[in-house]
Image (spheres, rainbow, N blue to C red):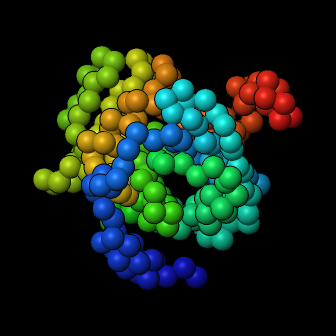
Amino acid sequence: MIDTRVLREEQRVLADNIVLQDPDDFQTPRFIAGADVGFEQGGEVTRAAIAILSYPSLELVEYQIARIPTTMPYIPGFLSFRELPALMQAWQQLKQLPDLVLVDGQGIAHPRRLGVASHFGLMIDVPTIGVAKSRLFGKFLPLEDALHSRQSLYDRDEQIGWVWRSKLRCNPLFISPGNHISIESAFFWVEQCMRGYRLPEPTRWADAVASNRVAFQRWQRLSGNL
């Protein structure tokens, strides 16, 4: 039996360590990673994929996939505890560590400020950004249909992220800082990683790797990695 009271207190303790400022020595990254987590075999297996892209070309240079037995059931609000073990294994397999990581999921846009991007960012001590495809927490004003329409995401009077229409006729993205990055920089770097799709290139490639999509198969053929 999972004691959510213990997990909730752990979230609060961890969230107190999140830094919402850019590191003093942070420079233009040479490598940006995308991280994506999914589940296979009816949830029995957790699959984490990390794609490393060079910047500013945003070309895939490395990827790692970790598949491990799922250690925790799905409990709303505690997803990072379920996803983190596979993410950490994929991270430990990397040969080229990135300077910045975009995670498919929430950063501080979470009831206790500890989405998977924040939790992962605390563990790896690298600036992280949450780029989620749906809202978990927070309120925002109605978003216009126009491309690049943006609204602040709030919890009461505190801004916890952004809601951004990255592509026409698509649902918006929910962007929030994970750790070691400001709210302004979180949006800036997601915007710099766009190439005409709904998702920024790092998480789009992480999804392509995880799901073995056509783009990834093509990259394998061209790079001789088949």
The part of the image, by quadrant, that contains residue 165 is: top left
Instruction: Report how many numbered discs are placed on residues in the image.
Output: 0
- Can see residue 128? yes
> Would residue 221 appear left or right of 186 to someone viewing this image?
right
Foreground: 104 or 169? 104
- Can see residue 38? no
The spot of residue 144 in percent (x, y) is: 26, 22
The spot of residue 115 in percent (x, y) is: 42, 58
At 78% from the left and 29% from the top, the residue drawn is 223
Q: Is residue 73 above or below residue 214?
A: below
> Would residue 112 appear left or right of 140 to someone viewing this image?
right
Foreground: 207 or 8? 207
> Would residue 79 appear left or right of 89 to someone viewing this image?
left
At 30% from the left and 72% from the top, the residue drawn is 16
Q: Is residue 70 above or below residue 96?
A: below
The spot of residue 171 in percent (x, y) is: 41, 29
The spot of residue 212 in percent (x, y) is: 75, 36
Quadrant of the rendering where the C terminus is positioned: top right
At 38% from the left and 44% from the top, the residue drawn is 27
Foreground: 94 or 217? 94
At 40% from the left and 17% from the top, the residue drawn is 168
Quadrant of the rendering where the N terminus is positioned: bottom right
The part of the image, by quadrant, that contains residue 141 is: top left
> Would residue 172 appear left or right of 100 to someone viewing this image?
left
Q: Is residue 3 above or below residue 60?
A: below
